[in-house]
Image (cartoon, grey):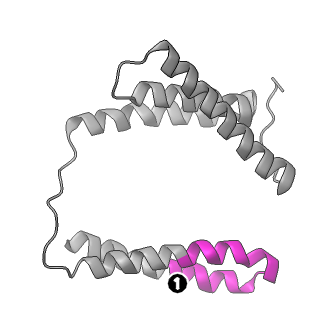
Amino acid sequence: MKSDRITSIVFILVGLAFWLQSGGLQYNCYIFPRFLVFLLIFWSAILFGQTFRKVRPPQDRESRDDLRYILVAIPIVLVWIILLDILGFVVSGVIFLSILTILLDLERPKFTRVISVIAVYIAVVLAFWFAFHKLLLVPLPEGYLI
């Protein structure tokens, strides 16, 4: 409870600092950052308010399994970052998101589940690529394969 209160205060202060820093940007450039900062401050204020409630549901401590999943995910993400320029955004995104999902899945992976995971990530990564690369004109790593 005390850690939630401290965390919410820190995030509110960080949000206010970002809000002030975005003031020097042009009008079109500061809309999205200020929207994100507003959400950060809003949700932090809600968390701060919840720390004063009398009845709180008991929270489970992270088990060793959670730590194991984190220790598996970190090297995979680091390899993904290293290979992003080589493989490109689309190929590396599909490969590494699929690997992470399959490895961190609690159930034993079946062939149909693996195929559905890959298909979903192909659609999601292509949607992100289209939104950022084509609509917003944000350059994404192309890699040597595409």
Seen as rendered, the residue at the extreme top is 111
Q: Which residue is mark 1?
A: 16
Image position, residue 42 (x, y; %)? 46, 79
Image position, residue 120 (x, y; %)? 61, 32
Residue at (49% x, 21% y) in the render: 113
Image position, residue 95 (x, y; %)? 62, 26
- Quadrant of image for the N terminus: bottom left
Q: Is residue 24 magenta?
A: yes
The image quadrant of residue 70 is top left
Residue at (66% x, 40% y) in the render: 124
Q: Is residue 83 left or right of residue 76?
A: right
Residue at (55% x, 27% y) in the render: 117
The image quadrant of residue 136 is bottom right
Can residue 83 be seen in the rendering of this structure?
Answer: no
- Quadrant of image for the C terminus: top right
Image position, residue 59 (x, y; %)? 18, 57
Q: Is residue 58 left or right of residue 46?
A: left
Q: Which residues are magenta?
A: 15-38
Q: Is residue 142 above or below residue 2?
A: above
Q: Is residue 73 magenta?
A: no
